[in-house]
Structure formats: C-alpha cells, structure tokens
Amino acid sequence: MSSETILILGGSGKTGRRVAERLMAKGKQVRLASRSTSPAFDWTDPSGWAAALEGVDAAYVSYQPDLAVPGAVDAIRQLSKLAVEKGLKHLVLLSGRGEDEALAAEEVLKASGAPCTIIRASWFFQNFSEAFMVEGIQAGELVLPVSEVREPFIDANDIAEIAVAALTEPGRAGKTYEVTGPRLMTFRQAVAEISRETGRDIRYATVPVDTYAAMLEEAEIPGEYIWLVNYLFTTVLDGSNESLTDGVFQALGRPPRDFSDYVRETAATGIWEDLK
C-alpha cells in the first residue's frame, strides 16, 4: 500500500469514479472529497478546501458542473494557490476541448507553479448512458439542439487511465494531453449505433436551442443547468472541434477506444432498454 494520499475532487462523477477505482486497484490511498464527505468539499465554499487538502500528496481535479460556468476560473486559481501552500506534488486537471473558460483555467493552474498535468477532453461516450441523454434513448427518441456537427467522442475510461498514469508515473508534469476518440461522429450516427446494437427503434430529432431550453424549463430543470446545456450545444458544438488528436496514444501508447466497443458493452448492461 502506498503511503501517499491522492485526493479525488469529483469522485462520484463519470471520470472521478473511474480514477478512484483504478488508483485503489493499484494499492493507492485515495481520499474522495465532496459536499457529503468529511471533511467536506464544496466548490462554492472555499472555507472547507484547506481541510480537504490537508495531508494530501496529489489530486485529480474535475470541476463541477463544468469549467465553463461563471466563477470556475477563480475557483481553480484559489485551489491551485492552496495546493502550492499545502505542498501538493501534482495536480491533474480535467479540462474541456473547445471551451475558452477551460483554457483560462488551465493557464491559471500553470501560472500557480503547481506541478500539473492537463487532460483536455472532448465529449464522453458515457454522456449517452450516465447523463441526461440516457432518458431520451430509453424512451425511444433523443431530442437535442444539434444537427450534423461531428464530435470526436471519447471514452471516460481512457481519460481515467491517463489521469492514473499522470498521478502515479514520473515524467508527466507539465504535459497537456488533448484527447479525442478515434473517429468523428454526429449525434445522429451515435444514436443509430445504439439503436442497431439494442435492436430498438431509437430515433434522433433536432430542435432549435430556444425550443430545447423551453423543454428543460417545462421539466423544471434548474436555470443554471439550462444555461450550461445551452452553452455546450452552441459554443462547444459549433464545428470547431471537428478534428482528431493523438493525445490518448501520447499518454498511453495505444489508440483510443472506439465508440462501437462502448456501445456493445453498455448495451449488455440493459441501461438502454425501454423502461415503459
């Protein structure tokens, strides 16, 4: 068992949970920090951050809900400064591809002087099975405000493996890994693959972003979440990310996992079955 303690901020999220599982499998001491842990960690309340970082050697940082939201850059600045004061040896930041605010957060982290690795990621495969899109797929129709823009979706497991490598292997500090999956796909194509694998008729429909926002309001989704969804579907999915990178290969020495593999394994869990 390693004597070092690694803090996971966002330990219940799509990547944080996977990072924690892999670190523990390696015999690493892991501390999960959230609003429900003791000590608690709340991104909106810096007063508890020092206690969460006490005795920690390194940290995986996944800002919730997204680095695009107002206040995120200042939060990363404060956290980075505190990490330097506490003597953390390494920070790994999950960043977002195509987000100006995420790039700004990366810069304040690097400027803090904290040894760091940045993982700049495209949209996750798991958004189709572990986030808001799963309900539409289960119902047989996914409705989104995006048409034929292609996204290089990536597996959250690839991101987790890169984070673990950065946290446990030498020579990763100062690296920025911009990571994508192996191919560009539209949301319509992604849903078609899920439909074929499950044997269900799952349709994909597009609506204007204003209509989509109204649908979320009708469903009583909180306003800040509606703002974030609108931002992601208009600013990030504007076509500027329609390119592939070799970031996964740079980090792990292998190609990124393909969407078809994810679909096959996820369909076998039954998560996409009709729940009516």
Image (cartoon, grey):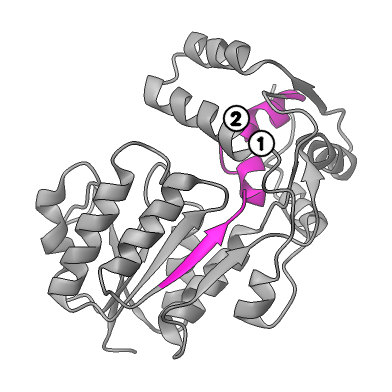
Q: Looking at the rendering, which quadrant does residue 71 occupy?
A: top left
Q: Which residue is drawn at 13% across and 72% down?
A: 85
Quadrant of the snapshot with the C terminus: top right
Q: On the rendered structure, is 123 left or right of 45?
A: right
Q: Residue at x 37, y 45 (%)?
A: 64
Q: Residue at x 59, y 40 (%)?
A: 236
Task: Return the x and y of residue 251 as percentages of the image width and height.
Answer: 60, 78
- Mark 2: which secondary structure? helix
* Image position of 116 with respect to 62: above or below: below
Residue 39 appears in which quarter of the rendering?
bottom left
Q: What type is the residue that disc 1 sits on?
A: Asp
- Report whether 176 appears left or right of 56: right
Q: Confirm whether the magenta stretch covers residue 43.
A: no
Q: Is residue 10 visible?
A: no
Task: Inspect this view and state whether residue 48 appears.
Answer: yes
What residue would you read off at disc 2? 234
Q: Are marks 2 and 1 in contact (CB under 8 Å)?
A: yes
- Where does the magenta region start and end? 117-142
Rendered location of residue 24, percent (x, y): 42, 76
Q: Nearer the viewer, residue 78 or 137?
A: 78
Disc number for residue 238: 1
Relative vertical location of residue 83 with respect to residue 28 in this rendering, above or below: above
Q: Where is residue 121 in the image (x, y as percent from the top left)?
A: 57, 57
Q: Within 10 angstroms of label 2, few (less than 14), some, or many (20 or more) residues? A: some
| Residue type pointed to by label 2 | Thr
Viewer-nearest residue: 127 or 22: 127
Q: Write the residue at 34% across / 68% down.
A: 110
Residue 127 drawn in magenta: yes
